[in-house]
Amino acid sequence: MSQTANAKLRLGVNIDHVATIRNARGGMHPDPVKAARLAAQAGADGITAHLREDRRHISDADIDRLMTEIDLPLNLEMAATEEMLAIALRHKPHACCLVPEKREEVTTEGGLDVAGGFAHLKPYVTRLAEAGSRVSLFIDPEPDQAGAAQRIGAAVVEFHTGAWCEAVIEANAPLMDKELARMQDAVMLAFDLGLEVHAGHGLTFDSVAPIAAMAQVRELNIGHFLIGEAIFGGLDSTIRRMRSLMERARSQALGRQSA
C-alpha cells in the first residue's frame, strides 16, 4: 500500500446513539439517518454504524436506509459472525470494521484479538475484501495485534483509544504519557507495515488533539461524545468544533515538523 503521512485527516461520525435514544421509547424519533445527513452537512467524511447482534441501537432498516439515502461512505461495524457477514455481503458498504462483541457489555470494552483469533477471522476478512469492502480491524494499540492484522490481509486498523481517553478524564499525567507513547508506537508500526491507520473510542474535545496530531493517522471515528454534546449545542456546531480541533492539532504538528 502506498501511503503518505500527513494526508488529510478524515472524521467519521458514529450515529449509533441517536438510535439508542430512539429505541428507548420506540417509534421513529430521533432518526439516525437524519443525523447522518446533518453530519454530512457539518463536514463529516463518513458515517459509522454498528449493527449489533441484539440490535440495541442501529437496526437492519437503518442500514438499508443509510446505504440508499446517504452519499457519504458507510463504515459498518460488525462482529465476525455468519449473520453479520451475510448482511455485509448483501449491502457491500464502503468499509466493514470487525469488532469484538459481547451481549452483556455496555460498549465495546477492548480491541479484537486478531493474533489469538486468526483462524476464525481470516475467512471473514477475505470474503469482505473480495466483495469490495475496505476491511478494518478494531484492535488495541499492541504490536502483536498490528502485526496479525497485516498478516491476515486487512487494509486498515482502527486503534482503540479508550485507555488514553480514560487517562485524560482522570487527569493522570504519568498514565497519559504512557498511553500516548503506546499509541504512538502502535500507529508508527502499523503505518510501517503498510496499514491505513484509524483511531477511535471515547474521544472528546479534551482528548482528541494528541491523537489527531499523529501524522500517520488517517481517520478518527467518534460517536457517543458528539451525540451527547449535541444535546447542549446542536449536532452541526459540535461536529464543526471537533473537526476544527482535529485540523488545528494536525496543522500545529506539521508546523513543528517543518520548523
Image (cartoon, grey):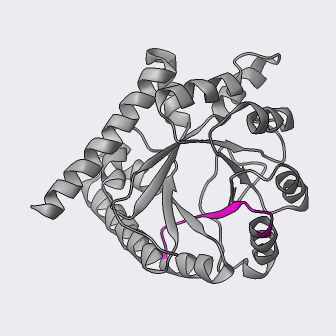
- Residue 2 to residue 199: above or below: below
Image-based side of 30 in relation to 148, left or right: right
Q: Is residue 195 magenta?
A: no
Q: Quadrant of residue 157?
A: bottom right
* Image quadrant occupied by the C terminus: bottom left
Q: Is residue 140 magenta?
A: yes
* Residue at image point 70% right, 27% down: 33
* Residue at image point 37% right, 73% down: 185
- Residue 224 to residue 185: above or below: above
Q: Tell me residue 28's x, y (percent).
A: 79, 17
Q: Tell me residue 10's x, y (percent).
A: 46, 48
Residue situated in front as seen by the camera: 168 or 186:
186
Query: Which range of residues does the magenta coloring cover?
Result: 130-142
- Residue 193 to residue 137: above or below: below
Q: Tell me residue 165's x, y (percent).
A: 41, 49
Q: Is residue 74 visible?
A: yes
How many numbered badges does the structure rendering display? Answer: 0
* Residue at image point 58% right, 66% down: 156
Residue situated in front as seen by the camera: 153 or 209:
153
* Residue at image point 32% right, 43% down: 247
Q: Tell me residue 73's x, y (percent).
A: 64, 45
Q: Quadrant of residue 139?
A: bottom right
Image-based side of 105 in relation to 204, left or right: right
- Residue 56 to residue 202: above or below: above
Q: Is residue 207 visible?
A: no
Which residue reaches farthest left? 259
Image-based side of 210 in relation to 49, left or right: left
Residue situated in front as seen by the camera: 131 or 75:
131
